[in-house]
Amino acid sequence: MDRLYSGMQPTGAPHVGNYLGAIRSWVELAARYDAIYGIVDLHALTVAHEPAELQARVRTMAAVLLGCGLPAPDRCSLYVQSNVPQHAELAWVFATVTPLAELYRMTQFKDKARVQQKNVNAGLLTYPVLQAADILLYKGTVVPVGEDQVQHIEMSRIIARKFNNRYGELFPEPKELVVSRGARIMGLDGQAKMSKSLGNHLSLLETPEDIREKLKTAFTDPDRKRRKDPGNPEVCNMWTLHRAFSTDEQVAWAAQGCRTAEIGCFECKKVLADNLIDHLAPIRERTEAWLARPADLDELLAEGSRRCRCLAAETLGEVYERLGLRPARQG
């Protein structure tokens, strides 16, 4: 089986955008690939955070992934990035072959630099180098991504090519597997992509009451200022969510009702809220069950990290040999 790699930062409980853009696909892909999924806490250091909260966020992220049905450890590996020190070691090696100009042209760096004007650190710039190390440390050949992340996988290919050309063929050039096409999952404010940092998200662990309350004030079609105004579902974020969580009949009902003003936004949101509550309830239950057993959760992560350290040590040994570095003494 081809080896698939993907990772997610531990920001606590993932939101609906994370679920539709990545997590749901991770669960399905684990049956088709030798899948390795990382909770990438080193990447999380590029933004200001509370150190005392980071471990709790790692646990919550792991519990939610398992609650969503990720089949670890039986059919995929789930691990914590900082538990495998070879990630940082390989990232430094890759930094020595990565053209600086390539990093400056990365769209996500430009976007993040605008948002983090007071904390534009070197880690933001070299983020793609560590990301390449994440993938290539396990010689991953397939990486599931959203359309806005394809550029990062191209960077991983460039880095693999640069290393191979200089030191001999070692790393495969990974290919992206685009798993979220079309409309992005916009935040409840309708202004930007769903994000915790912007406070416009809907967590996978929201209570039914919170789901209803958040949807009540969620942005819809700007042309529907009054109940009788017809709208266009294509520009309404509620319809995007309907397409993900509602039946085909309900999606058609919402689209027709919006265009003809036969239904109001309140009615549309009520049906959507019911469907979201039904879909997320078992995820929340399973997540809470894992969080109630922290020792079992930690052991599962430790098992995944042990497997990944073995794979990583083998790869880094090959890298050091190519570079002419002295291997670490055993024992």
Image (spheres, helix red, strand yellow):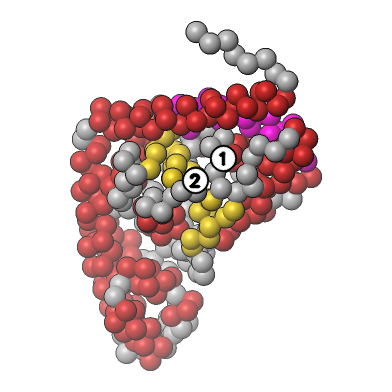
Looking at the rendering, which quadrant does residue 57 occupy?
A: top left
Which SS class for mark 1? loop
Nearest to the observer: residue 198 or residue 36 = 36
The residue sitting at 70% across, 38% down in the picture is 169
* Residue 130 part of the magenta segment: no
Q: Amino acid at mark 1?
A: Lys
Q: Kindly identify which residue carries mark 2.
A: 3
Can you give x and y, in whole percent of width and height, for residue 95 in the image? 71, 33
The residue sitting at 56% across, 61% down in the picture is 147
Q: Amino acid at mark 2?
A: Arg
Q: Horizontally, is 244 left or right of 177 in the view?
A: left
* Residue 97 part of the magenta segment: yes
Nearest to the observer: residue 236 or residue 322 = 322
Can you give x and y, in whole percent of width and height, for residue 170 in the image? 66, 37
Can you give x and y, in whole percent of width and height, for residue 54 in the image? 42, 31
Residue 329 visible at all: yes
Crowding around mark 1 (Cα neighbors within 10 Å: few <14, some 14 to 19, many 20+) is many
- Tell me if residue 231 comes above or below residue 11 in the rendering: below
Compare marks 1 and 2 and give the one earlier in the sequence.
2
The residue sitting at 66% across, 23% down in the picture is 320
Magenta region's main secondary structure? helix
Stretch in magenta: 81-99
Compute the Cα span from label 1 to label 2.
7 Å
- The residue lying furthest to the top in this view is 331
Q: Kindly identify which residue carries mark 1.
A: 139
Looking at the rendering, which quadrant does residue 36 occupy?
A: top left
Residue 134 visible at all: no
Nearest to the observer: residue 263 or residue 248 = 248
